[in-house]
Image (cartoon, coloured by chain):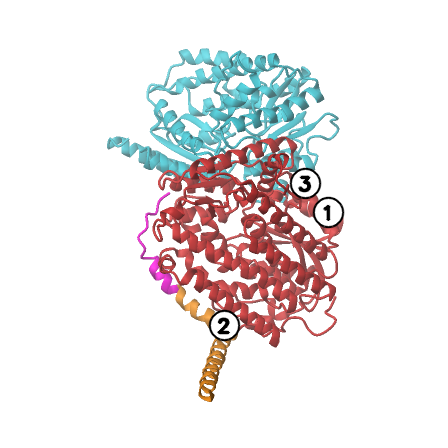
Chain colours: A red, B orange, C cyan
Amino acid sequence: MKAAEKRVGAKDFGKAYSDGRVRKYREWRGVPDTLYDYSRWLYNWVTMFRVVLSKPRNIKAMFRYRWMANYLAVPMMVDRHTQGLRGEHLRICHAEQDLIIDDVAKLLDKLFRGDRRIGNDKAFSDKVVLVDENEMQSLMMGFPTLVPLSREIASTYIPVLLNQRAALHYIDVAQEYGLAGDVCPMPEAEAGVSIDDDAPILGKCAVQCNTTCDGSLMGNGVISKRLELEDGVPIFQLATPLRHQEDDVQEYAAQEIRNAIAFIEKETGEKWDWTHYFECAKRVNYATKCRMEWLDMNKTPYPQVFGSNLALYTETNYMAISGRIAAFEEADRKITALAEKAFRKKKMAANEYRHRAIIWGVQSHYYMDFLVWLLNCWGIVPLTDMLSMVSTKMIAETDTPENREQAIYDIAWLTENMIMRNRTHGGYKVLLDELWEIVEEFNADMVILWEHMSCKALDGMHGLFEERARERGIHLVWVSHDLFDPRVISRQGVRDQINSYMRTVMQEEPVDPTLEVINDAESW
Amino acid sequence: MNKIVNIVLKILLRLFLFACGAFAVTFVIYILNLDMKLTAKMEPVLFWFYDRVKRDQHL
Amino acid sequence: MKDLKHLTWFEDLLQDANNELVVQARDEGKKCVAYVCENTPEPLLNLDGVFSARLRAPRTSSMEMATYYLTSFLCEYSRALLERAMEGGYNFADCLIAPDGCTMINRAVENMELLHTMDEGKENFFYENMEIPMKADDNGLNLYVLQCKNHILKPLSEKFGIDCSDQAIRKAVEEHNRVCSLIRAIGEFRKGDHPTITGYEFCVITLVTYAAPKYLLIEKLEETLEELKTRQPDAKDNFRARVLIVGSEVDDPEFIKLVESTGAFVCADRFCYGSFPGRDPITLTEEEDALTQICRQYMNRGQCPRYMNQAKILGRRSYVDKLAKEYKADGILYEQIKFCDPWAYERMVGSHVMHDDYGYPVLSIDRPYNTSGTGQLRTRVQAFIESIEIKKIHGGV
């Protein structure tokens, strides 16, 4: 399918790439869209100056923590995700990205404010509850006066989105201490940050969670050794059931939430606030409603909110925000309005749509904008991805005695169904069987299956994915990567897997041949 | 009265010229990606500092 | 030392998952409950009318089919089990019960189920996946009990008509304890300065108790215990250092043989399929139902790294220290099967802590599932043993 009117997106995107860290120039999008993008670029720099760089303590932190260097690349991350976008799609992307930038800037500022090494604001630190990187913050929906902060989001998760090499130093540190090189590099890097003495020290208490995988669970043990036993921050380990689809684990999950709340109350002296909880719950439901609307649009020939933007925004909004911040509700509203407008006008986000794809598996973190490349280079539309297919269950949102009890089960359910773990755990049905239901629902002809090499939960279904795809006549393209470590498979290595499939199996020529091979090995 | 109007106009003109200048400069930075080219140069400098930070590396 | 009378018989039992005692028990009309993880309470799988067999894949060579399904990034233990299942090597099983202990074994079992490796033509065959606690506390205990009821006792009762009453469970615990106390007593012979059993022999005997019906082993275990009481040690010790092995599952005694061939004596076994804590007897009182007591003891004693609360994490180190002292270990060998996530972390932290905080010489290795003929491994262990020996000479250990 080709765009009916004038061309969407620039020609020859590949020419903007240089061999170095950054691109030669920014994209010319026509006068209105270029000016709009310019204004958002300026806005993001102002945000970073206002929230982070204007404070001496944050400058001090910039020279203390190695991972802070990656934040130099924030504008480039936005450029990568907005590539080729025009009109409503560009505005949707900025509505998401700019808010995330604002939120992350505030996270950094708060971390350094409480950090014993930097700001050392004890009173503030006493309000901080540290949470895991992969932890549903729905647990904090009833604590409006406390500040949940994740050191790992700031030190590893975001940096790898910004700079493909961000985690390498920490992975090496962990391996120097004897950690096997075959574990998932995400918890490995987080453990490396702790070993390297490169994590801010703050907080009244912490809640760690067994979300995602065995590696994540075990990495927490490394972090807690230092955080709890040396820095004296008490930690509650929230054990969330793995077989989350089973009825007979829900009471256990709910009791864990009750225990976690009791722990936070005891450590901080704060009380759970039901009024605030239900306010947040309304926002969680609104976000769910919006996400479902976007996904419904993506089932039609004119998808509007899709690709890496959908994944990144859902991840942030669903997991890290959990209805706690009103600005995200506003963004949901704005994005929905823009998407509806574009949908009515049957707008396309690229010049040509050739294939409708479901993106499954754990995405390469060092190449999150791969989905933008898929669209621009081969016309493959990433309709939705595994990380965006999270819980669509509406949670109790009015304050009644019954709902207060139900709320505990809702928080437990959300925690069990945290992004990624809702598919990688809970039995094969949620990972394997539901994929084909989604393929049908979205009328997709292709599955791009990320194979994160050290994600055992995904690898363990490899053969059955292939068999099922063959039975259904769906094109399944494996894309191997190592999540945080481009030394194992480079970005071009990732692209080559698609290139060779499209050329040899599909016998197709790229939509934009300049994107087929790009020398971005040194790029951020 | 005219004098005040002139002064106001002058200020507005200067502000306008300043805004135009600021726009021209920042737009050039934006479109030629100069901000990223500069920060890319800063990265090795920061690494120099990080390598010299005293840290208690242990498990 | 003179060969143990029944050693060859025990060794033969380990040559095949479907060993002669499994065949005999099935011929007697008992149902075989296959399982794959130490967190499955064994007495519940050995109620009257059923017996347990912990799956192993002895003499594994190629794992190509399993590697296609699981990729080469999953641990070889999971792959070896799936390969053997696909080859029909576990067709003797009447059901398979698996806790979601680690992701890899969970996926291996799910593949077994989806590929119908064991259930073809067996009307009552069932696969059960259990959730098991990750922390040792009251909530974890409640979960454990409920899961055992729903995923072990209920299907055993419904499918095979097994009596799962409190009384029946107590009877099974009695038999379980008989085997455990025999293994403990046999293991005591490793404590002396001149041990009368080798680590290899002990490993073979312990492994058999996981892989064969227990009630058919008791007689031979008793005879072996009696034999050990009068067994004379060699005139000169043929080992240079006493080593405690800690780590992930070891279901192949050849690994212990390899370690001992370098001049070590494996004085204690803190690994999955080992006797610590797997062969701790279960103490029951009349005040509480047997199932709850079994689950509590499994949960509290469990040394699996998936237990994530701080008390459990610290407990794992002190447990290793206690064993090392009790069995007079000169050094500790931390091992893991390659690609095992839980033990990759546990090995890293444990090996540092036991060396830095407890002062033990520690060797930390990852290894393939099949260790026979692994020259590199032998060289590393040999160097470790020599380093301990040198320290001993210099009075350092």
- Circle 1 chain: A
Q: Position of residue B5 (x, y in %)?
A: 48, 85
Q: CA distance from mark 3 to mark 1?
A: 11 Å
Q: Which residues are magenta?
A: B44-59
Query: Which of pointers 2 and 1 indicates the residue nearer the eye?
Result: 2
Which residue shows up at 33% across the image and 60% down it? B49
Numbered tag placed on residue A173 in the rendering: none
Q: Is residue C112 above or below residue A91?
A: above
| In the foreground, A56 or C146 | A56
Look at label 3 and name its amino acid.
Lys
- Circle 3 chain: A
Q: Position of residue A196 (x, y in %)?
A: 37, 49
Q: Quadrant of the C terminus of chain C?
A: top left
Q: Position of residue A363 (x, y in %)?
A: 58, 53
Look at label 2 and name its amino acid.
Asn
Q: Is residue A123 visible?
A: yes
Check disc 1 and report the residue beneath it.
A437
Check disc 3 and report the residue beneath it.
A429
Q: CA distance from mark 3 to mark 2?
A: 47 Å
Q: Which residue is at the far front?
A: B1
Q: Is residue A451 above or below residue A347?
A: above
Report the number of discs.
3
Query: In the image, are marks 2 and 1 on the same chain?
Result: no
Q: Is residue A502 visible?
A: no
Secondary structure beneath label 3 = helix
Q: Is residue C75 above or below residue A480?
A: above
Secondary structure beneath label 1 = helix
Which residue shows up at 35% across the image and 44% down it? B58
Check disc 2 and report the residue beneath it.
B33
Which residue shows up at 56% across the image and 42% down it? A275
Would you say residue B52 sits in the magenta stretch? yes
Q: Residues within 10 Å of mark 3 (few under 14, many from 20)?
A: few
